[in-house]
Amino acid sequence: MFSAISRVFRTPDLRRKILFTLGMIALYRLGTTIPAPHVNFANVQTCVDGMNTDGQTNLFSMLNLFSGGALMQLSIFALGIMPYITASIIIQLLRVVVPHFEALHKEGQSGQTKLTQYTRYLTIALAVLQATTLLTVARTGGLFGANTDAACSNVLDLVAETTGFDVTTNIIRMIIMVTAMTAGTAAIMWFGELITERGVGNGMSLLIFTSICASFPQAMWSLMSGTGGGITFAVVIVLAFLVLVAVIYVEQSQRRIPVQYARRMVGRRTYGGQSTYIPIKVNQAGVIPVIFASSLLMLPSLVAQFNTPTDGTTAPEWVIWIQNNFVSGDTWPYMLTYFLLIIGFAYFYVYIAFNPDEVAENMRRQGGFVPGIRAGQPTADYLAHVLNRITFPGSIYLGIIALLPLIALATVSANQNFPLGGASILILVGVGLETVKQIDAQLQQRNYEGLLR
């Protein structure tokens, strides 16, 4: 391993790319520690230190995980990369319903450039919306869950609503905070694009990878200091290793559909005739179904929060039922709904990312066919049949992995930011494997030898 690392840094071009990537990651982590303007950092720290771990903060747990803990700190990078991820998903989904977007997708590089520009504009719009929502929730103290400390309602330095209350001052301060957080999102987006262009790996994915890794020390320490201490920590480490091996095995698994291209004579030369394959991964949808399901399960909590009386009266029965079953992640209705939503979204997203009709038509135009299957619609039906069979175990696998943090929450009282399961483990494995492949490919281009001999 050490010889492989030394070969990486002995290659000048690759060394510059890796150092540039590390520099961008360092700037990103620095930004997560800088509080936004008009944020009372002392009160924020008091609330974060006193936060309970009974699952009451699951509404913002994924956002906080993807921001590397910056969201709960209300830093200038509090929104993290999530606005960009959401914008990318929306633009991809719009290809199905907006013909103009689908036409741009088929135009090649010029069309992709325009779609990227649309994604940037939508990212800024979503950042403004999310920053406004985050600051509104933080102002009421709801950001920190069931923590009822008085400091949690005063994390923003706003003018008190007393006699002579100055509305203009508070509006200006809120605008400044929203602008700072939106600018932070734009800076993160720029960092990611720079890493993709001048560094190693996909910049956006590496920034998410960094944010998740940043939560590991706190999560591990919470296990050490919790019930069971060292025994719980040792058991979790062993189980985490087994889960990691299983995830790597499944993420690398794929069904290869053979494709044969017919020979064509052009003058005296023969073209085509080669054999290749279409790789269909077991987890074709990646981490997207988990994000979709988590986002949808935020709605019951929001509805219950807005319908909870603030005058001390008893809440309606349906609100109490939602609070008991869909606010905390360690209840069986929440887990069952989460699991079923992941399966549904897995099928939904796979058919958007991999269109059997489009693939079959492209094969027919290029003279390709699946051995034993007629070209055209029979090939599309065959690809859809294989995709259905592969997606079913893949969606079950996604659901089980996504439930691991909730099971840990219920059994060892771990925080919902528990990084050894759910979206986090899928992102860590996926980004790690892809980055290593890129480094290996660049090493082979220069030294005829990859990372491993």
Image (tube, helix red, strand yellow):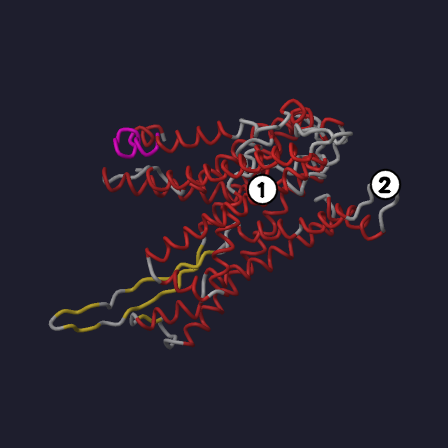
Which one is in front, 253 or 356? 356
Q: Secondary structure at mark 2?
A: loop
The residue positioned 46% from the left and 73% from the top of the image is 381
- Residue 311 in percent (x, y) is at 85, 41
The residue positioned 80% from the left and 50% from the top of the image is 319
Residue 413 appearing in the image? no
Three-letter amino acid code at the position of disc 1: Gly
Q: Earlier in the sequence, mark 2 or mark 1?
A: 2
> Rounded to the nearest whole Å, what is the CA distance between mark 2 and mark 1?
40 Å
Image quadrant where residue 79 sits: top right
The residue positioned 30% from the left and 29% from the top of the image is 9
Q: Secondary structure at mark 1?
A: loop
Is 217 positioned to the left or the right of 360 in the image?
A: right
Which residue is disc 1 drawn over?
Answer: 421
Is 28 positioned to the left or the right of 274 in the image?
A: right
Which secondary structure is most common in the magenta stretch?
Answer: helix
Which one is in front, 170 or 336? 170
Which residue is disc 2 drawn over?
Answer: 311
The residue positioned 48% from the left and 66% from the top of the image is 386
Q: Tell me the quadrant of the picture where the N terminus can be found.
A: top left
Mark 1 surroundings within 10 Å by alpha-carbon count, few (fewer than 14), some (14 through 19), many (20 or more): many
Outermost residue to the front: 164
- Residue 363 in percent (x, y) is at 34, 69
Over which residues does the magenta segment extend? 7-19
Residue 358 appearing in the image? yes
Q: Tell me the quadrant of the picture where the C terminus can be found.
A: top left
Whether tag 2 and tag 1 are in contact, CB under 8 A, the answer is no
Three-letter amino acid code at the position of disc 2: Asp
Which one is in front, 71 or 21? 71
Residue 8 lies within the magenta run: yes
